[in-house]
Image: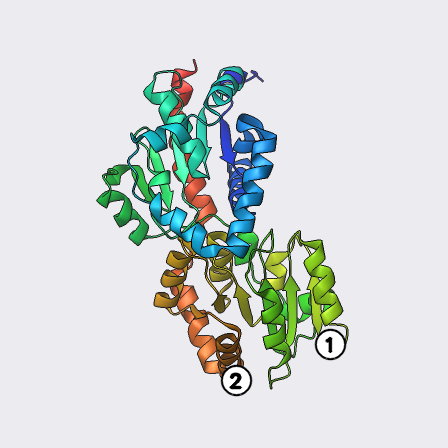
Amino acid sequence: MDRVPSSQVPSFLVLSASYGGGHQRVAEVLADAWRRSLPRVRVDVVDFFEQFVNPAVNRLTRSLYVRSVRHAPRLWGAFYYATGNIRPDSPTQRFINRLGKTRLLAYLRQRGPHVVVSVHPTPAGSLSELKGEGKASQPSAVVLTDYAVHSQWIHPHVDLYCVASEEVRAGLTDRGVPASRIRVTGIPVDPAFAQPVDRAQVASRLGVDPARTTVLVMAGAYAMLGGILDVHRALSALPQPVQAVFVCGRDEALVARLRQRSRRRPDFHVYGFVSNVHEWMAVADLLVTKAGGITVSEALVRELPMVIYRPIPGQEEWNTRMLVASGAARVARDPEELRRVVVQLVSDPAALESMRAAARRVRRPRAAQEAAEAITQLLPEALRGAR
């Protein structure tokens, strides 16, 4: 058998970030989709800020982001909206584009990926600038990870945008992006969320009662769900006999506090970071969560009704609007409203079924495959250029 030259083995570079867990999850499911669909492929998933900017800067900016979202969400929202309409050629955007640009160029020349995919806006700008300067030639794809349009994602030398919805497509075209460069794929999530499961069997294995109403509370990878202690208090005061599962991400101190508060509630289960979210969503009747684009997309695919608690100003407000407008979620902005909404929903099976039906109408279970296939269409030209 003739050996395929390494330059002709399809290769993708996926530029991610560790600001929350969503960007990395999208990068990983895309990589898995290519490995399943292509007989020979090389996929490198790289944390752009860690490898190309600076590890210390990465840790500092990630900490500032988490702290601002947790403790000063309005400040974060003000920053988000202030940068929402800056032009790609503005001094501010050109400054952001220079972050990591030199090291990214060195990597491209050394590794020679055929296609570069950005699942965070900053690397998309850096690569666009390199292409504009004639220093890089790889096709560039961008996968938006929210149901919102923000100028940080929009750059002149992006060849393909994979977006969550028709509304996002319209938002991009309104800002001058050619429609031919946009594909509505949905936000990529692990195909495991679309797989049917035996709820009773999975619940038994996870240690919860499949016959009882289960409320799943997800705080996010860095526990950025504001007021989770208030959520615990609100669920503890429900008149209905529900069981609750708290997933607290990597915040070990929060895990300890919630376990202490749950010591008299054996039907309250508290975990840190888990790798089987698809199973927990399969056994839940209701999800209380922040409105991160990936988490809510996973819940939509699983057809799990949601209550969005204290949505963060900015992209999560846009995500929440989409979810509420579709009928797949309700919103609660304080503990008392949360208690009222949860009481209403767990007392009304028809309301929960209506929300599941709404999720079924808007979910995109094949988003990972469709995005991977759309990006793969950029390969032939790139492979010809590598000969």
**What residue is at 28 percent from the left and 44 percent from the top?**
172
Frontmost of labels 2 and 1 is: 1
In the image, is 116 to the left or to the right of 154? Answer: right
**What residue is at 63 percent from the left and 69 percent from the top?**
199
Give the quarter of the image for residue 141: top left
Label 1 amino acid? Arg
Tell me residue 22's x, y (percent): 53, 48
In the image, is 44 to the left or to the right of 149? Answer: right
**What residue is at 56 percent from the left and 62 percent from the top?**
196
- Whether residue 45 is visible to the viewer of this picture, yes or no, is no
Label 2 amino acid? Ser
In the image, is 74 to the left or to the right of 278? Answer: left
Badge 2 is on which residue?
A: 347
Give the quarter of the image for residue 47: top right
Badge 1 is on which residue?
A: 265
For label 1, count other residues whose C-alpha is less than 10 Å away and answer few (under 14), some (14-19) or many (20+).
few
Tell me residue 187's x, y (percent): 44, 49
Q: Image quadrant for the N terminus?
A: top right
